[in-house]
Image (cartoon, helix red, strand yellow):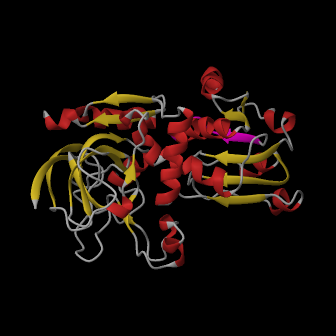
Amino acid sequence: MTLIPAYAASDAGSPLVPFAIERRAPGPRDVQIEILYCGVCHTDIHQVRDEWGKGIFPMVPGHEIVGRVSATGGEVVNYEPGDMVGVGCFVDSCRQCPQCRSGQEQYCDEGMTATYNARERGSGTPTHGGYSTRIVVDEEYVLRIPEGLPPDRAAPLLCAGVTAWSPLRHFGVVAGDRVAVVGLGGLGHMAVKLAAAIGADVTVLSTSESKRDDAVALGAQDFAATGSGRVFKTHRGQFDFIIDTVSAQHDYNAYLGLLKVDGTMVLLGMPEPAALSASALVSRRRRLAGSLIGGIAETQEMLDFCAAHGIAADIELIGIDAINSAYERMLAGDVRYRFVIDMASLRGA
């Protein structure tokens, strides 16, 4: 075991502060990664504040990790020192259930082993995430960062990117489909870029008129502010697919009314339970579904697609000492569109 620098919350509600954690030496199938960048996800705030319960403290967040391989175990075949790689939201799964065998590890019957705030299979050691300088992960759960993707802007793709990509692929969005993206934040801006690159006709639906120019710059063909409610009449029955990224409670029924017959609305956010009218679904054979991140193969597919199409996250690069203020800015919606931590700031701390 080796002690390395990290930032951790000592308990729920505590600020993140410098901390030292132990990382194991690489086992036969392990890849040791020197972390260069780590994206900051809204999930990190939920977890360090224990808003979802069952927090394991001290907690080192971070599941949008990009770095260079610094060592490998003797049985590793896919990576070698110097490779640029990534680690996303999970670092293990049961590997035996139907979901794991079909490349959908995020839906593992036993539950995926999260990159942080979980316990390693076998040892029970708490997992710690990317707000640190090093991580050791089984090669089966490591992603290759393609050449041409800026490593800092690639970090958010490992969560926000694949979370938007997975439903677009699973529900079969194709060129020419009319797609609405609800909310233009970390998830929403990636959904716009990816859907537009697929060839869909994208409309952004946002409460904030101030995001119109950004939406168009990201690739949307249209923008509609939802504050007045007028959009729910002017755009009624127009969309094949709606990707809803909003975590605050809102009226699903109003948005379902924007779908065509056989249209699908997919939830990526997890707000408090909202009332749902059966008639909003039944009247046009619509579907309301949910989606969670993506499996390893799907994540690699998304990374390769992004490299081929020149897509990366729009970020603000910060030092680790700015993480607590970054959390407050995220809660205030003051980021375009993802914070990424430069881990050089932790090595020099």
Report the side of 258 relative to 290 (left or right). Answer: right
Residue drawn where x is 66% and y is 56% of the image: 274
Q: Position of residue 257 (x, y in %)?
A: 82, 48
Taking the magenta stretch, the answer to whether it contains residue 182 is yes
Residue drawn where x is 32% and y is 52% of the image: 48
Residue 137 in sight:
yes
User: Is residue 145 positioned above or below 106 on the image?
Assistant: above
| Residue in front for this viewpoint, 142 or 118 | 142
Q: Position of residue 61 (x, y in %)?
A: 31, 51
Taking the magenta stretch, the answer to whether it contains residue 191 is no
Quadrant in which residue 208 is drawn: top right
Image quarter (top left, top right, bottom left or bottom right) of the N terminus: bottom left
In the rendered image, the residue lying farthest to the left is 2
Report the side of 184 relative to 55 (left or right). Answer: right
User: Is residue 118 positioned above or below 21 on the image?
Assistant: below
In the rendered image, the residue lying farthest to the front is 77
| Residue in front for this viewpoint, 289 or 2 | 2
Report the side of 39 relative to 301 (left or right). Answer: left
Quadrant in which residue 272 is drawn: bottom right
Q: Position of residue 81 (x, y in %)?
A: 23, 48
Residue drawn where x is 35% and y is 66% of the image: 54
Image quarter (top left, top right, bottom left or bottom right) of the C terminus: top left
Residues drawn in magenta: 178-186
User: Is residue 75 positioned above or below 173 on the image?
Assistant: below
Q: Position of residue 34 (x, y in %)?
A: 22, 46
